[in-house]
Image (cartoon, helix red, strand yellow):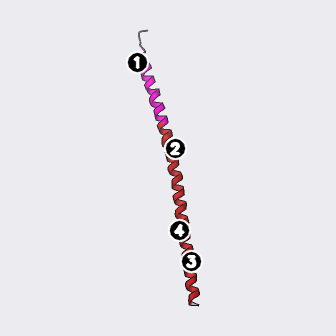
Amino acid sequence: MENASKALLIAAAVLVVILIIAFGMRIFNSTSDVSGQADSTGKELTNQASKAQNAASKAITSAGNWSFMN
């Protein structure tokens, strides 16, 4: 009877370890998705900032050519 209870405790410990590993893998996979999304969002922000900088530069250049005395 003592061997059976030890076997049940070992089986329970193995199941707990499997659950902990599965949970850790799920957390790892979900954080890799988040980092991929953050990378694409960062690239999009960089593109938008570049477009805004170009538009502002063009606006300043065209405003410099404008005169009140035309």
Identified by mark 3, the residue type is Ala
Q: Earlier in the sequence, mark 2 or mark 1?
A: 2
Q: Which residue is mark 2?
A: 40
Q: Earlier in the sequence, mark 1 or mark 3?
A: 3
Q: CA distance from mark 2 to mark 1?
A: 36 Å
Judge the density around disc 2: few (<14), some (14-19), many (≥20) Cα neighbours within 10 Å.
Answer: few
Which residue is outermost to the bottom?
1
Residue at 51%, 58% in the rendered image: 28
Numbered disc 4: secondary structure: helix
Judge the density around disc 3: few (<14), some (14-19), many (≥20) Cα neighbours within 10 Å.
Answer: few
Judge the density around disc 1: few (<14), some (14-19), many (≥20) Cα neighbours within 10 Å.
Answer: few
In the image, residue 55 sits, relative to residue 1, either above or below, namely above
Q: Which residue is mark 3?
A: 12
Evaluate if marks 2 and 4 touch, with contact meaning CB atoms under 8 Å apart: no
| Residue 64, label in figure | 1
* Quadrant in the picture for the C terminus: top left
* Quadrant in the picture for the N terminus: bottom right
| Residue 20, label in figure | 4
Q: CA distance from mark 2 to mark 4?
A: 31 Å
The answer to whether 68 appears left or right of 26 in the picture is left
Residue at 52%, 60% in the rendered image: 27
Percent across and percent down for residue 24 are: 52, 63
